[in-house]
């Protein structure tokens, strides 16, 4: 690990989870593994924060849950993006992109 | 993909906790395994997984809180979604059974419509604020005689002045006297009912005028300019709603008055709602006349209690002052007191008991209507058992099914309620039109917000009442239904019992209403049978008030009436014409009586009825002359005074002697000459229910009232005579209007209106109740016969005769009728007291009425059972046995 892991804000965790679930329905463990692999360990979401976020997003009806069978035939709670969640992801992603571009415009001259 | 996802069903708190534990355990197992793959030993891997997870306890709490919140929200949206689903489903179900829906709708609309219409009257008169400022602090004060039950009399001017000066309870006390007038404009002269009021009356009532102003202090004194305040109705009707009327002058009974204001639309004068014009009242002439100041009772009083003073304090203070006055003026005030009545009671008066009885009756009709619809729903539940069972099998819980059936009832109730309210708008207007004198302030009655909200509550309430029983019954019977598709199973028996109970209750309620209606009919018949002492058939009556400078002398008055009577007598068909101060149906006046040669009684003289009458009045009225003679043209102003007594008066004061030739003095003035008794006539009743009043009649040539109630006896329709009468009046004096022309029988009929309307409504309610109950009996018997087809088939197969089968069904129906009848008659006997105030000449437990009601009810039950019984007789045993 060349960089130390970055602590993430709550809103960032939410948008990352939404983006992850946009690929396919996953259980909580799957989401955490996916994000770890995808960012090559730069972004680690503390699992406590991840599960809190999953239940929060479920309450907001951006994702919904159902019990299913995992790859190794165990009972697991699968989360799936709802239509509303998909809409939310689109707006949050756009906001993120604008935010990142703005930050870069300031940082670039270095 | 998403189709695989159904929302998780509602989870209990313990279930949510277990789910969360499962979810986290799965995570830790997977993470431990991953770490072991990286080379850790299992124990270390597990410890590392827990360590890197973060705050586990907080996370659990957080997640459970989120889950709980989410579940609650889901629950709410679920309920709304289900409600919508239920409403749509109910609507479809009702559309599939239009016959049932229409009958149920009509039934409910009649029940709700009747209740709403009556309630709008009750609301207008008993609940709504009176159109005065702070009406609960207002009182109406009447003169009262403590020796008789007379509590609605008038107060003398001197007594009023003393009451006003000595009392401390009232902020203001105002007096008014009767006194309308004839408006002489460009068209026909119009007679207007009105009052003369002192300057504080409108201030006491707290009325804000619609236009202009009301009277101010000093405007009621002798020297003031003649002014006039108009009621809203008269302003619209007679003066065309002229917005510039204030300041204009009008000719009223020959006197020019300046209009200073118009009263607001909803205003009505308390206890004299018909008054439309108001002129100032000047008491000084009466107060100056020593004989009239305390003995001439012509004032009505209104008072406004001071803040902080109770009604009881005000009343007892006034009573105490009248006791002082009694001691100070024994000759005038012995047995004189005042009756102080709260304004609401004063205004509503006799209408209250009738209204409450009718409201109760309409609620009973509504209850019967609900029972009917409940019965229909019970029957329908039978045919819907399979549908319900299927829904139950698909996962609908019992609560959900009850809720769905209740929704159906509510949809039905709301449709019925909407129709009922529409009906009530029309019925309320019809009621006001029919009520006439029964409603003291018809302007206050309308279907307003309060009425609509109440109607809505009643609608929803009745939906629950008639929906709950069948819903519970259906959901209970549901478990059995899928197994057993035959009819008449055990579930059917409970349902049949329930329906029989409903029908029995309906019959009992209908009986109560029938008894009520019967008693009111009997009362009215008794009243109409009352011998009034004269005949009302083929008699025209109208009022003439001589106004203007032409009639200032007694001779002019005599000449006018002589000429009028002569002209009217010459009209074709007319057999007799007379005139009197008042006709007995419209009240009378009183005078004190002193008898020549007898010692004066202690204190005050006795009071008797007093009427000035024309020569031929007794013949025109059809009153019998018992002894002596009637008046003639010789009994004029210069002749000795004469008087004719009623039989009752003669009997009361000359029990063992012949009064003819005796001399009496009438009225308080001791300088009046003595009158010699010349004749005795039969007694007449005052009003329709009153007792005959001992009365002294004097000649209208010897006591001039400036007007008369004219009585014309004719051969045919009295109203057909009216154009000719108008012609003769115009020929005599074009400025004189004909006041309140009516046939005497109509006047009598109007006097009975306040009894006839409640009776008619009660009959309508009772018939409605009876019809609904009969439909209920028919329904339950038809259902019973259908359910027992097989049993009847077996009986017929075993040799039962059609006669037996027929009798069996009838017995069953009559059984319910007898139980209902017994309960109903007991109920009616218990509730009789409620009606007592509306009855005349019958007791609340009148045997004839009870027997008649029993006969009617049994007959109607038999008719209702007839069709089902015939159907039972026609059951073909072979088919009945094969069909199941």
Image (spheres, coloured by chain):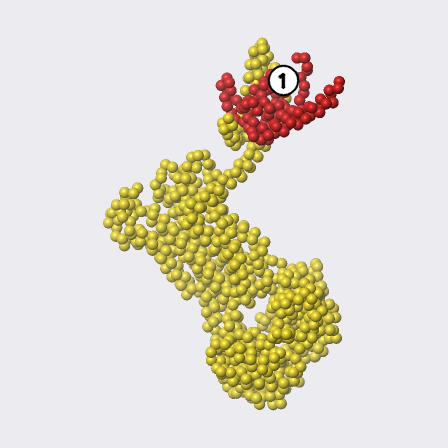
Q: For mark 1, give the secondary structure.
A: loop
Q: Quadrant of residue A7?
A: top right
Q: Residue at x 50, y 17 (%)?
A: A72
Instruction: Please state, as top left, top right, bottom left or bottom right, where the C terminus of chain B lies in the image.
Output: top left
The image shows residue B418, relative to residue B132, as above or below, that is above
Foreground pick, B698 / B243 = B243
Q: Residue at x 61, y 68 (%)?
A: B237
Q: From where the camera sits, is residue B789 visible?
A: yes
Q: Callout 1: few (<14), some (14-19), or many (20+) C-alpha neighbours within 10 Å?
A: few
Q: Quadrant of residue B277?
A: bottom right
Foreground pick, B244 / B629 = B244
Q: Quadrant of residue B487?
A: top left
Q: Which residue is mark 1?
A: A39
User: For this view, does B57 lie left or right of residue B422?
Assistant: right
Where does the image place residue B248, in percent across and percent down from the top left?
A: 70, 70
Q: Residue at x 46, y 70 (%)?
A: B526
Q: From where the camera sits, is residue B598 visible?
A: no
Q: Residue at x 50, y 53 (%)?
A: B419
Where does the image place residue B524, in percent across and percent down from the top left?
A: 47, 68
* Residue closest to the far top: B39
User: For this view, does B343 lie left or right of residue B166?
Assistant: left
Where does the image place residue A106, in percent across and percent down from the top left?
A: 74, 22
The image shows residue B760, relative to residue B25, as above or below, that is below
Q: Colour of chain B?
A: yellow
Q: Colour of chain A?
A: red
Q: Chain of mark 1?
A: A
Foreground pick, B550 / A110 = A110
Where does the image place residue B533, in percent across and percent down from the top left?
A: 49, 78
* Residue closest to the far left: B799
User: For this view, does B355 lie left or right of residue A39?
Assistant: left
């Amino acid at each position: 690990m060349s960089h130390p892991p970055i602590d993430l804000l709550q809103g960032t965790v939410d948008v990352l989870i939404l983006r992850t679930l946009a690929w396919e329905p996953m259980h909580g463990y799957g989401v955490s593994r996916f994000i770890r692999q995808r960012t090559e360990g730069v972004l680690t979401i503390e699992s406590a924060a991840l599960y809190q976020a999953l239940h929060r997003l479920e309450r907001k009806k951006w994702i919904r849950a159902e019990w299913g069978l995992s790859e190794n035939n165990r009972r697991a709670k699968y989360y799936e993006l709802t239509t509303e969640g998909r809409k939310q992801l689109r707006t949050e992603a756009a906001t993120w992109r604008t935010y990142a571009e703005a930050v870069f415009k300031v940082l670039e001259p270095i | 993909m998403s189709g695989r996802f159904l929302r998780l069903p509602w989870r209990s708190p313990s279930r949510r906790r277990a789910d969360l534990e499962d979810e986290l355990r799965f995570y830790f197992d997977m993470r431990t395994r991953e770490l072991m793959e990286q080379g850790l030993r299992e124990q270390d891997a597990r410890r590392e997984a827990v360590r890197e997870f973060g705050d586990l306890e907080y996370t659990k709490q957080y997640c459970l809180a989120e889950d709980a919140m989410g579940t609650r929200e889901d629950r709410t949206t679920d309920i709304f979604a289900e409600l919508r689903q239920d409403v749509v489903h109910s609507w479809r179900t009702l559309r599939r059974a239009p016959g049932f829906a229409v009958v149920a709708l009509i039934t409910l609309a009649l029940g709700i419509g009747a209740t709403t219409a009556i309630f709008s009257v009750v609301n207008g008169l008993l609940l709504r604020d009176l159109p005065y400022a702070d009406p609960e602090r207002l009182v109406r004060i009447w003169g009262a005689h403590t020796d008789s039950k007379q509590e609605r009399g008038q107060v003398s001017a001197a007594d009023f002045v003393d009451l006003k000066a000595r009392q401390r309870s009232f902020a203001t006390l105002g007096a008014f006297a009767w006194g309308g007038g004839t408006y002489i404009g460009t068209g026909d002269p119009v007679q207007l009912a009105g009052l003369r009021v002192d300057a504080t009356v409108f201030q006491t009532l707290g009325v804000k005028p619609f236009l202009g102003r009301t009277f101010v202090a000093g405007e009621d004194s002798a020297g003031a300019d003649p002014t006039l305040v108009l009621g809203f109705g008269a302003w619209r009707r007679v003066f065309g709603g002229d917005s510039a009327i204030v300041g204009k002058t009008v000719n009223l009974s020959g006197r020019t008055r300046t209009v200073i204001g118009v009263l607001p639309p909803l205003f009505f004068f308390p206890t004299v709602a018909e008054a439309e014009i108001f002129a100032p009242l000047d008491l000084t002439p009466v107060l100056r006349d020593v004989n009239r100041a305390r003995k001439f009772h012509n004032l009505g009083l209104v008072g406004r209690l001071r803040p902080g003073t109770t009604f009881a304090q005000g009343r007892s203070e006034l009573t105490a002052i009248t006791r002082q006055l009694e001691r100070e003026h024994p000759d005038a005030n012995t047995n004189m007191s005042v009756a102080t009545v709260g304004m609401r009671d004063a205004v509503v008066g006799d209408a209250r008991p009738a209204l409450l009885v009718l409201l109760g009756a309409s609620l009973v009709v509504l209850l019967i209507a609900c029972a009917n619809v409940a019965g229909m729903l019970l029957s329908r539940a039978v045919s819907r058992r399979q549908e319900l069972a299927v829904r139950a099998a698909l996962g609908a819980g019992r609560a959900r099914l009850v809720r769905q059936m209740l929704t159906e009832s509510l949809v039905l109730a709301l449709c019925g309620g909407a129709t009922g309210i529409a009906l009530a708008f029309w019925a309320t207007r019809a009621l006001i039109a029919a009520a006439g004198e029964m409603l003291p302030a018809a302007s206050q009655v309308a279907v307003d917000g309060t009425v609509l909200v109440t109607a809505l509550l009643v609608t929803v309430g009745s939906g629950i009442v008639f929906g709950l029983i069948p819903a519970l019954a259906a959901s209970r019977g549901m478990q059995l239904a899928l197994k057993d598709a035959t009819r008449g199973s055990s579930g059917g028996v409970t349902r049949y019992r329930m329906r029989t109970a409903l029908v029995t209750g309906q019959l009992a309620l209908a009986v109560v209403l029938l008894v009520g209606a019967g008693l009111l009919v009997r009362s009215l018949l008794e009243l109409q049978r009352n011998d009034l002492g004269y005949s009302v058939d083929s008699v025209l009556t109208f009022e003439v008030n001589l106004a203007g400078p032409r009639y200032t002398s007694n001779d002019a008055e005599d000449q006018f009436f002589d000429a009028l009577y002569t002209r009217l007598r010459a009209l074709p068909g007319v057999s007799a014409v007379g005139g009197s101060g008042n006709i007995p149906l419209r009240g009378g006046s009183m005078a004190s009586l002193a008898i020549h040669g007898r010692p004066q009684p202690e204190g005050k003289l006795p009071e008797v009825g007093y009427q000035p009458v024309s020569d031929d009045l007794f013949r025109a009225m059809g009153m019998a002359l018992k002894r002596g003679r009637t008046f003639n043209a010789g009994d004029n102003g210069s002749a000795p005074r004469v008087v004719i007594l009623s039989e009752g008066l003669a009997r009361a004061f000359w029990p063992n002697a012949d009064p003819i030739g005796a001399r009496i003095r009438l009225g308080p003035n001791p300088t009046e000459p003595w009158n010699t008794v010349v004749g005795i006539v039969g007694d007449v009743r005052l009003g329709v229910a009153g007792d005959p009043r001992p009365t002294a009649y004097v000649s209208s040539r010897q006591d001039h009232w400036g007007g008369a109630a004219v009585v014309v006896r004719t051969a045919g329709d009295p109203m057909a005579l009216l154009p000719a009468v108008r012609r003769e009046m115009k020929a005599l004096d074009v400025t004189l209007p004909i006041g309140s022309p009516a046939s005497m029988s109509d006047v009598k009929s109007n006097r009975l209106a306040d009894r006839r309307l409640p009776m008619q409504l009660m009959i309508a309610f009772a018939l409605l109740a009876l019809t609904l109950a009969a439909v209920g009996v028919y329904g339950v018997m038809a259902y019973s016969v259908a359910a027992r087809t097989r049993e009847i088939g077996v009986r017929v197969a075993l040799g039962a005769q059609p006669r037996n089968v027929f009798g069996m069904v009838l017995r069953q129906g009559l059984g319910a009728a007898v139980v209902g009848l017994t309960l109903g008659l007991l109920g009616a006997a218990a509730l009789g007291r409620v009606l007592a105030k509306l009855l005349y000449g019958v007791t609340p437990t009148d045997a004839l009425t009870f027997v008649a009601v029993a006969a009617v009810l049994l007959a109607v039950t038999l008719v209702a059972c007839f069709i089902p019984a015939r159907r039972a007789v026609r059951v073909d045993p072979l088919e009945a046995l094969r069909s199941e």
